[in-house]
Amino acid sequence: MMQHYMETKQEYPDCILFYRLGDFYEMFFDDALTVSKELEITLTGKDCGLKERAPMCGVPFHAVDSYLYRLVQKGYKVAIAEQMEDPKLAKGLVKREVIRVVTPGTITSAQALDETKNNYLMGIVYLDGKYGVSTADISTGDFLVTEVESDRELFDEINKFSPSEIICNNAFYMSGVDLDELKNRYHVAVSDLDSHFFGDESCRKVLREHFKVGALSGLGLDDYAVGVIAAGAVMQYMYETQKSTLEHITSITPYSTGQFMIIDTSTRRNLELVETMREKQKRGTLLWVLDKTKTAMGARLLRNYIEQPLIHKEQIIKRQNAVQELNMNFISREEICEYLNPIYDLERLIGRISYKTANPRDLVAFKTSLEMLPYIKHILEEFNSELLKELAEELDPLQDLYQLIDRAIGDDPPITVREGGIIKDGYNEEADRLRHAKTEGKDWLAELETREKEKTGIKNLKIKFNKVFGYYFEVTNSFKDMVPSYFVRKQTLTNAERFTTDELKQLEDIIMGAEDKLVSLEYDLFCQVRDDIAAQVIRIQKTAKAIAGVDVFCSLSTVATRRNYVKPVINEKGVIQIKNGRHPVVEQMMRDDLFVANDTFLDNGKNRLSIITGPNMAGKSTYMRQVALIVLMAQLGSFVPAQEADIGICDRIFTRVGASDDLASGQSTFMVEMTEVANILRNATKNSLLVLDEIGRGTSTFDGLSIAWAVIEHISNTKLLGAKTLFATHYHELTELEGTIAGVKNYCIAVKEQGDDIVFLRKIVRGGADKSYGIQVAKLAGVPDSVIARAKEIASELTENDITAKTKEIAKISANITQHKAVPKPDEVDMQQLSFFDTVKDDDIIRELDGLELSTMTPIDALNTLYRLQTKLKNRWKENL
């Protein structure tokens, strides 16, 4: 046995080998050391012909799923070596084979998987400067393929699907992609496979054979040369690990990233679409707000909708109309929800049925789900919106399968398939005959016991059974002298004797034979029923998708009516107009206060860029995120939290909100910020929505102001970008840009002052803020009074002495530069207005100013020059003092 174990282990050197021995899966040598440490189970040993005992540990076979999941969660692969024959019937060594390899991306156990999200395996191939990306969920049968060209696009796809496991070719390892970030930041198991997985012809062949097509054009894969290799590698990997036909993977869906709104990694994180930034939880996300689904399939589909908003007006309006009709027929909607409640996860159930791992209770759950389908279909047929009509047509009631399970499988069967008690009476004649023999045999035993009691006079004579001796008569020692001669002794106990007779042996053969035959027959009949259901996999998957769609639209409708959302108008003119918009998450999290609604107006003309000023904690970030979320909700087909909304379709949403050091990769706050800004400026289009918060705050005041200024100029320039933008800042100097740069408008958060205290009104109003209220905010945050008092003193001194109080004049000068207007020479400037020149007469600073060629200077050059001159003045004052 140990020799066979070692041979099997050599075939799967990168896996932990679970080797079935009776009621346990055993591990030996290094595997045992690893598993005992990772799972904290007892390490023992076994003599196996070596000088030292082999380290050994084991887990019970009936609880193997939980142990498997814990190992796979830690990134291990596990090979399952199963007993392929009954040990009672085996001659010599029991035959064992590896029946599957469980990896993070191929685990199918219901206990191990989160039913509300897909468990994806992703294949990535780097070839000819492109990335082929193929994503599969082996538990549901979803199979997707695309191609991207840049590292950032690749990471966006990885972030969108959040795969548990990535397999790749060696060239991907050498492409310069940060694999440590994948493993540590995204918690993905990454492994490069042997080159034979990525052969062009072998990949094409496996896809043609699996989907039974003559050419890949039949699958729509003509334009995905590198993607085909990724998909073929994933398919081969699934075949090799699952060792099954994968019949539930019935289609492959090619897609282009341009089919959906592009949401990059940082935007997904900043907007908290499906998990919060800090706790990584669902509560507090957009998904948490919108998810009122009743089924696991619906929950997964809604997550996909949020991750991939639409960009085509017709598709968005189709979804909106479905939600609207459900709103108007809320009684029917609630009735549908009642019928959706008992439906189990049909997608994963049919996956387990196809895998032949489904147990009898899985089929009962499947039947319970099918029972609801005719009622849902009947209600859906009453609706008129295009999408709901399509879902009604796609929903197959599957009543033939319901009737099959109802006739064949008992209502309360055992979990295991080899215990019997699975098949109903009346389904199979032979099973009924054996079942009657089994029950009648018990009557025969009772009659025999009664006859022998009367014949022998032994009052406490009993017929009993155990697995070792079978059936026997038990006689206590007080009556053993009365035992007749035809009783044959089988066992002697301290207080009793056990006997058998020829008649008892005959009955035992009949009863035991019937029971064994019945268990075997019931297993065969169960497998036949399971196979008959598996043969209808395409019908079942189509119905499962329809149920998921119905569930999602009922969920969106429920949220819309409960939260007083409105149907947004969808336009292609680039206008975003929101009246009394609300943040969908924040308003739901608020318990003791009312959410203050705000208006928004952005377009491609005079209102392209809104500069928003105001103190911290006043609500700038909430407002900007609110606008982004309302746009995103509108494009996924949902109603939105507002009084009215007219939403122009955005091809992308970019956010730069907040900043944090990326210590793991050695990047500072400012470096992270600038990297994200660079990505936005390089990839945004005029149809994008940009949300930028505090650009430039991670560096010195003048550098930060210069960068923020230049970014605004770049974005507002229609020849360079011209995207709709919300730009929050503490640099009040930037408010001077309204009127000097086309498309820029100032807004601020209204604040009410009460002595030294302030009250945030949370209302966005036209105009710029003239104060930051930093000290008041510090007071609200609980900073000690002594610190607050000293801060006021220092602020007062700086206000009086620091010439940066005059930077508004500098801003005006630079604004003139931006507009290429004539700027007065220093001797023409009002010296009373620019009082920092008062201490200087006709010296080198004045002469340098006089000689500047302002018409050729950029705004940043102008600011840097002014900063240098200012520093020179400060130093001269210090010398004079």
Image: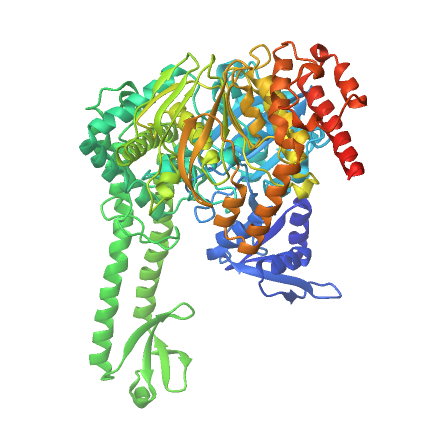
The x and y percentages for residue 146 are 55, 22
Which sits in the foreground, 835 or 549?
A: 835
**Above or below: residue 733 compared with residue 819:** below
> Could you say which quadrant of the image residue 149 lies in?
top right
Q: Quadrant of the C terminus?
A: top right
> Could you say which quadrant of the image residue 19 lies in?
bottom right
The image's colouring method is rainbow
Q: Quadrant of the N terminus?
A: bottom right
The x and y percentages for residue 62 are 46, 56
**Above or below: residue 126 compared with residue 137:** above
**Residue 473 can be seen, yes or no:** yes
**Above or below: residue 37 compared with residue 81:** below
Left or right for 390, reference 787: left
Residue drawn 30% across the image and 30% down it: 565
Which sits in the foreground, 245 or 159?
A: 159
Residue drawn 76% across the image and 20% down it: 846
**Above or below: residue 269 compared with residue 473:** above
Which sits in the foreground, 817 or 625?
A: 817
The x and y percentages for residue 509 are 35, 62
The x and y percentages for residue 581 are 36, 29
Which sits in the foreground, 157 or 190?
A: 157
